[in-house]
Amino acid sequence: MKIAVCVKQVPEAQHKRLDPETKRLDRSGEGALNAFDANAIEEALKLKDGGGEGEVVLVSLGPEKAIDALRKGLAMGADRAVLVADDAATGSDLLATSRVLAKALERENADLVLFGQQSADSDGAVLWAAVADRLRRPVVSQAAELSVADGKVRVKRQTEFGYDVIEAPLPAVVAVSDAINEPRYPSLKGIMGAKKKPQETLTAADVGVDASDVGENGSATVVYALGEPPARGDVQKLEDDGSAAEKIVEFLAGKRLV
Amino acid sequence: MTTLVFLEHHEGEFVKNSLGVLGKASSLEGDTHGVVVGSGVKELAARAGAHGASKVFVADDPAVEAPLPQPRVDVLAKLVRDGGYDTVLFGQSVLAADIAAALAARLEAGLNWDLVDLVEQDGKLVGKRPALQDSVYADVGWSSAPRIALFRSGAFDPSETGGEAQIEDVAVELEDFSANATMVEQAHAESEGPSIEDADVIVAGGRGLGGPENFRLAEELAQALGGAVAATRAVVDAGWYPYASQVGQTGKTVSPKLYVALGVSGAIQHKVGMQSSGTIVAINKDANAPIFEFADLGVVGDLHEIVPKLTELVRQRKS
Amino acid sequence: MTKPSDFPPPFSWREAVGPPTDPEDERIEVGVAIVGAGPAGLACAIRLGQLLEASPETAERLGEVPVAVLEKGKQAGSHLLSGAVVNPRSLRTLFKDRKRTDEMPFFGPVPGEAVYFLTRHNAVRIPAPPTMRNHHNFVASLSQLGRWLAEQAEESGATILPETSATKLLVTDGRVRGVRTGDRGRGRGGEELGNFEAGSEITARVTVLCEGTQGHLTGAAVGAFGLEGESPQVWALGVKEVWRVARPLERVIHTMGWPLRAPARYREFGGSFIYPLGADRVTVGMVVGLDYRDAELSVHDLLQELKTHPLVREILAGGERLEWGAKTIPEGGFVALPKRLHAPGVLLCGDGAGLVNVPALKGVHYAIESGRLAAEAAFGAVQRGATPATALGAYDDAVRESFIWKDLQEVRNMRQAFGRGFWMGGALAGVMTATKGHFPPGNARTHPDADQELIATGRASDYPAPDGKLTFDKLSSVFASGNKTRDDQPSHIRIQTRVPAELGRMWERMCPAQVYEVQGGRDGTADVQVTPSNCVQCGAITAKGGRLTPPEGGSGPEYSLT
C-alpha cells in the first residue's frame, strides 16, 4: 500500500510573527515540522509496519529549507520526500496550495493520503477537504482511529456530538486528529539514514501547475491589514464579601452562559 | 450581495452557530437564503425564516441523511452556480469545515476561516479573524466571487426576526465519488459529558484547590454547568489529576465559551492554553495572581466557600 | 550555619561510566563521536571534515559516518547562550582560505566600549581594565553562531544528531569506546510509554567531549580517569535577556558594582554586560559567581533590578523583551583545569574543560580553538599505524603550546582575588595584569561553591516586583526561553529533597527557572518540590549542592537569539 502524507514546515513556535509588510507569516527564521503532521506520519508508518510492505512518501509545498522538516519525517521512517519549492508559490492561500498539492499527489497516485489535524501556523483545519475534492476522492476528517482492510479505510471520526464510524473505499483522503497516536521518536539510525533517502525538490511547473496559478496570483483571498486584538473588555475584579457566588451567577446570566 | 448560509442541524434542531451566522448574514445588505440538507428535514427548514432567511432550499433525500461533507458540496455547488450567489457562509464545525474547503476548491473560490466578524468596508466585504493564538487581529478579504467564509463558534448570537421563509425543494445530484464515504455508525449524545476539546464550559483546578480531594469541587461545578474538568501543569505534576486534563503550553489548548479557573495562578504556561476562551471567571485567594489580569471576572476569595454555593445556585437555575 | 555541601545529591559519576551492554550488531559505529554541537564540538567537526576531505583513505577507514555530533537540544543553538563578544582569531584559523570574517554571522565589530561602576542611581565611567578591552573583537549571538557552524559542519560531511542526549561514557579495558544515548518516551515514574525508544550505543574510535559547562560525561571522564585539576572548579551564573530596542546601542558596555555588594563577607563577584546585536536589538545580562553566600540572592532578580538603573532603563526604553536565558560559566580558570585534557579514547574541549578567561569574559574562541586542535589529534589517532595514546596525547601538547594556555595562565589568580571583596580584588587584579601574571607567583586555590556557608540579609526585599514590561517574573521568563519540555518524564535533577529550610530557600532563589519550591517548614526542615520541566539546564544546582543530569533529548530551552 502506498501512503502519501502531506506535511508542512512551520515557523518555530516562539518567534511566530506576522510580517507587517506582506501581512503574512514571517517564515524567514527557523522552521520545524508541523507538530500535527507527526501524527499523520506516525499513522502512516503504523499502517506500513502492520501491512509488512508498502511505501510512505512525504509531500509538501514550501520554501527550499523546508527539506529539513521533511528530513525529520524521513528519520521517523518515511521512505521518500517530495517538496514543491517554488518562489512563485509564496503567499499561496488554501486554493492555490490545494491546487499544487493535488497535482503533486496525483503524480504519486497513493492509495491513502493522510493529513495532520491542523497547521500550527494558520491554525487552519481545512486543507484536506479541498485537496480531496480536486482528487475526486472520498475524504474523512478528525480521525481518532483508523484501520485499513479489504481495500477500505475505516475511521472513527471525532465530532462535536461524539464519534462517528465512517468507511470509504481506497483511494481515500483522511485527516487524523492528534488524539490518534503518540508519534514515535526518530531512532538514531533513522536520523543518520534520513539524508540518504530519496528527496525530490520540484517546481510548480514540474507538477503541472502554472506559475500564475500559485502564490498570490493563484489565490482568491487577501489580507488587508493587521492590528491589535480588541481589548478583552473591562476586567472586573471583586473581593468576596459573602455574596461572590451570587455575583458570579449574575455575571454569567448577563452573558447568557447559565 | 446574495448570500447563501449553510444551516447545519443535529437531532432535529439547528446548530446554534449556523443560526448565529444566518442572523449576521441577514443584517448585511442583499438577500439571505439558507440551505438545509438531510432526510426528513422539511419541517425544520421552515423554521429558518424566523432566524433571518427569506428563502430556504431543502435537499431532502435519504441519500444525504448522514452528516457527511461531500454530498453537501455537490448540493451547494449547484445552488451557488445556478443561483449566482456571491457569498456563502458557514458556522465552524467538523462537518462545515470540510464542506467549505471542498466547495472552495470546487468553485475555485476563496475561503477565509476562523472569522469572528464580517463587515462591509469601503465597498468590500471584510472578515475579521484572530491569528497567532489571538495575539493579532487580521482583516481579510476575497479577490473574487464567490466568497466563502467559516465563522468561529460563538461569533454571533442567533436572533429571532420572526419572519417566514419561502421554501424551495432541490434535487440531490451527486458526483461519482461523493457517496463513496459511508456512515457505518453515527454519533450519539455522549453519556460521560464532553471532552475538554469539545466542551463549551470548562472548570479548571489549580494548586489553590489545596489537594487532590478538592477536585471534587471542580467536578461538581462542571457537572452543574454541563462542562468538562481541566487541570494545570502544577497539579498534574503533583499527581492530583491526570495528564489528559492538562491545559496549557505542554498540555491541551482549549477555547470554550466559559472557562472557570479555581485556584489557578494564571502563569503564562497555562494562559497560552486557554486565553482565547470566550469568558474567563477566576476564583483565587491571592489578589496578585496573574490570572486577574486577564480574567473577565476575577473573584478574590476562598474557593472552598464560594464554589459549593455557586454550584448550588447554578443547579437551581437549571431546574 | 548551613553549607550546601553538607547535603550532597544522590549521584555519583560512576553511574555515567560503564561498558557497552547492547548486542554488538545493535551498536552504531561512527568514526569520531563528538558530544555537543556548540562552538567546540562544531569546530572539531568542521576541522575533521577539512582533514578528511584532503585524505580520502582516512575518510574511508572511518566508515559510513565518519563524524557524528550529538546534541541534546532541539537543534544546534537551542542550548547555546553567551554574551557575546568574540575574538575572531579562532574562527579565522578554522576557516582559513575558506571564509572571510564578513561571511561569519557577527553583528559587526565592537563599535566602542565603556565600563561603568554603578551605584543605585549613578553610573561612573571607569577606564576599561586591560583584560576587558575588546578592540578588534566582534559581537555575536552564540546561538546564531552555533546554527551557522552547524550548517558548515554538515556541509563538511558531519552528521548532526539533534535531540540526542549522551548519558553514559562507554569504557572497556580502561579505554573510552563511545557513548550511550538517553532513552526517550519514559513517564514520570520511569515507566515506558507507548512511544518509548531506548537509547543507543554509539561506538567511535575517538570520543570528543564538548558538552559545555557542567558537562555530564566530562565529569564522568574526570572521575573515571583521575583527571581532577589542582583546585576544584567553581562557576558563575549568567542570566540574560535579548530585547528589541527603539534606538541603536553604539557601544559594548560592562558594569561592576551595584546591584552587587562589595564587602568580602558577601562574596558577590560579577557584573553585567549590555551588548548591541545589530541596530535594533540589545542583549543585557547579569553574571554572578556562585560562591555568593546570601541565601536570598537571585541572579534573575538582580538582572531585573539592574534594568531599573537609569543607565539601563534608558537603553531599553520603548523596547520589548524577546528572549531570556541562563547558563553557568566555569570560573576556576587555570588552576581548575583537569590534570590532562585527554585519556584513552577521549578528548576534553571548551567550557566543559574549563577553558574560560574570566577577567576577559571570553571562552568562545578557546572552545573553537580547542575543538580544532582536538580534531587534529583525533585525525592523527585514526591514521594507519598510529599509536592512539601518543596521538591523543598530542592534543594536550598542542593546547599547552597554544594561546589558550598562555592566556589562562596569565590571569590564573584574578578570580580568586575577588574572594577578598571588590576593592581588594580589583587592586590585586590590577597588579596581576601589570605583571602579566607573574605576580603574585604560585596558584591561588579555589573553593567549591557549595562549601560557602549561607547567610541571610533580607536582600530579597530590594528585588523589584515584576511589571511585565521592564521586569519579569521567572515563569514568564522560562516561557521566553522557548522551553516546552515534556512534563511526563523522569526528573533529571538530583538533590536531597528533605533539607534545612534555609538551604531549600537558597535553591528557590538561586534557580532562575523556578524549578525548586519549598513547601512548609518556615524554619527547621522543609520539603523541596521540584518542577523539572521548567529547567533550562543552566547548571547552577550542580554548583550549589545538587546535580543536573541530562533530561530526555529535545528538552530544555530553544534559544535562538542568545
Image (cartoon, coloured by chain):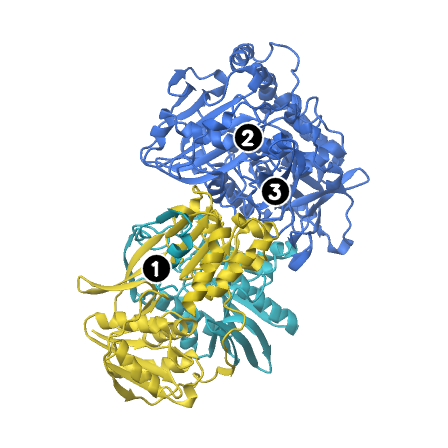
Residue B12 falls left or right of residue C415: left
**Res C126 seen here:** yes
- Quadrant of image for the N terminus of chain A: bottom right
- Quadrant of image for the C terminus of chain A: bottom left
Q: Which residue is mark 2?
A: C237
What residue sits 57% from the left and 67% below the top?
Answer: A43
Amino acid type at circle 3 is Val
C22 or A84: nearer the eye?
C22
Task: Tell me whether marks 1 and 3 sit on the same chain.
Answer: no
Label 2 marks which chain's residue? C
Residue C153 falls left or right of residue C305: right
Chain (blue): C
Placement of A19 over or under C507, stated as above or below:
below
Label 1 marks which chain's residue? A
- Circle number at residue A91: 1
**Res B109 seen here:** no
C211 or B91: nearer the eye?
B91
Considering the numbered disc 3 on the image, is that residue within a helix, a strand or a loop?
A: strand
Chain B appears in which tint? Answer: yellow
Amino acid type at circle 2 is Leu
Which picture quadrant has residue C192?
bottom right
Q: CA distance from mark 1 to mark 3?
A: 45 Å
Q: Which residue is mark 3?
A: C530
Chain A appears in which tint? Answer: cyan
Task: Tell me whether marks 3 and 2 sit on the same chain.
Answer: yes
Determine crowd level at label 2: few under 14, some 14-19, many 20+ residues with C-alpha closer than 10 A.
Answer: many
Placement of C106 over or under B299, stated as above or below:
above
Which picture quadrant has residue B160?
bottom left
A47 or B275: nearer the eye?
B275
- Circle number at residue B230: none
Determine crowd level at label 3: few under 14, some 14-19, many 20+ residues with C-alpha closer than 10 A.
Answer: many
The percent coordinates of residue B91 (x first, y second) are 35, 71
